[in-house]
């Protein structure tokens, strides 16, 4: 058994827990700088961070991210949807190898200048698990719905 602050977990020789920083970033109750998460939640948070990072925004890793945030003011047509789906799929394939995309929908809302993203994914090492990410991107910011 291992421990991290007030968090205890069991490890087995054949099982390595996936660890990550929780999103959104916040301090822990034990006085740490960042709270942590494990396994499926780590992958979900990684996907949200990847999708919401504008390509070119991260120093020394200019190809990390997608074009979602920069597309809010673009003409909402089928070409935009196709480009965003491709951008998201390529980013996940390259930077989040733990995830397998089961379903991806990009739904533009021209009236409200917003884009809804619905992503269903599973983990590569656990295909029986699936989870969902729902994001709404608009000029005011991002709303995480699931």
Image: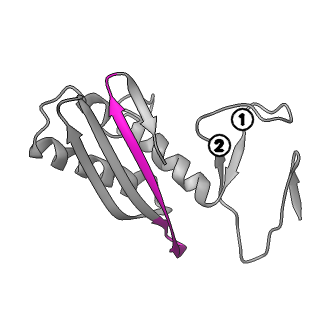
Give the left or right position of residue 54, taking residue 31 as reference.
left
Residue 16, percent from left and from top: 70, 67
Dot 1, crowdedness within 10 Å: few (<14), some or many (≥20)?
some
Which residue occupies the foreground of this view, 84 or 78? Answer: 78
Residue 13: percent from left, percent from top: 78, 76
**Residue 128 seen:** yes
Numbered mark located on residue 102 in the image: none
Is 137 in the magenta? Answer: yes
Q: Residue furthest front?
A: 111
Residue tagged by mark 2? Answer: 21
In the image, is 78 to the left or to the right of 72? left
The answer to the question of whether label 1 and label 2 lie on touching residues, with beta carbons closer than 8 A, is yes
Instruction: Label 1: state its secondary structure.
Output: loop
Element type at mark 2: strand
- Of 113 and 35, nearer the camera is 113
User: Reading the chain from its start, which is encountered first: label 1 or label 2?
Assistant: 2
Q: Would residue 55 be visible to someone looking at this image?
A: no
**Residue 43 in which image quadrant:** bottom right
In front of the other: 145 or 125: 145
Query: In which quarter of the view is residue 135 placed?
Result: top left
Tally of numbered discs? 2
Instruction: Give the residue at mark 1.
Output: 34
Taking the spot 59% from the left edge, 60% from the top edge, the residue there is 40
Q: CA distance from mark 1 to mark 2?
A: 7 Å
Give me the residue at 64% from left, 60% from top: 39
Residue 4 drawn above or below residue 23: below
Q: In the image, is residue 86 above or below residue 116?
A: below
Find the magenta span and give its range.
Answer: 122-139
Quarter of the image containing the N terminus? Answer: bottom right
- Name the outermost residue toward the top: 140
- Residue at the image point whose x is 24% and y is 51% from the top: 86
Q: Position of residue 56 (x, y in %)?
A: 35, 30
């Amino acid at each position: 058994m291992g421990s991290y602050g007030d968090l205890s977990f069991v490890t087995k020789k054949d099982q390595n827990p996936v660890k990550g920083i929780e999103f959104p970033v916040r301090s822990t109750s034990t006085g740490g700088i960042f709270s942590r998460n494990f396994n499926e939640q780590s992958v979900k948070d990684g996907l949200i961070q990847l999708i919401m990072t504008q390509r070119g925004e991260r120093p020394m890793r200019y190809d990390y991210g997608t074009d979602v945030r920069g597309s809010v003011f673009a003409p909402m047509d089928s070409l935009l949807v196709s480009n965003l789906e491709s951008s998201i799929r390529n980013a996940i394939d390259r930077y989040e190898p733990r995830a397998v995309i089961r379903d991806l929908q990009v739904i533009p809302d021209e009236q409200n200048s917003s884009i809804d993203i619905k992503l269903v994914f599973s983990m590569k090492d656990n295909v029986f698990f699936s989870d969902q990410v729902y994001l709404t991107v608009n000029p005011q910011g991002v709303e995480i719905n699931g």
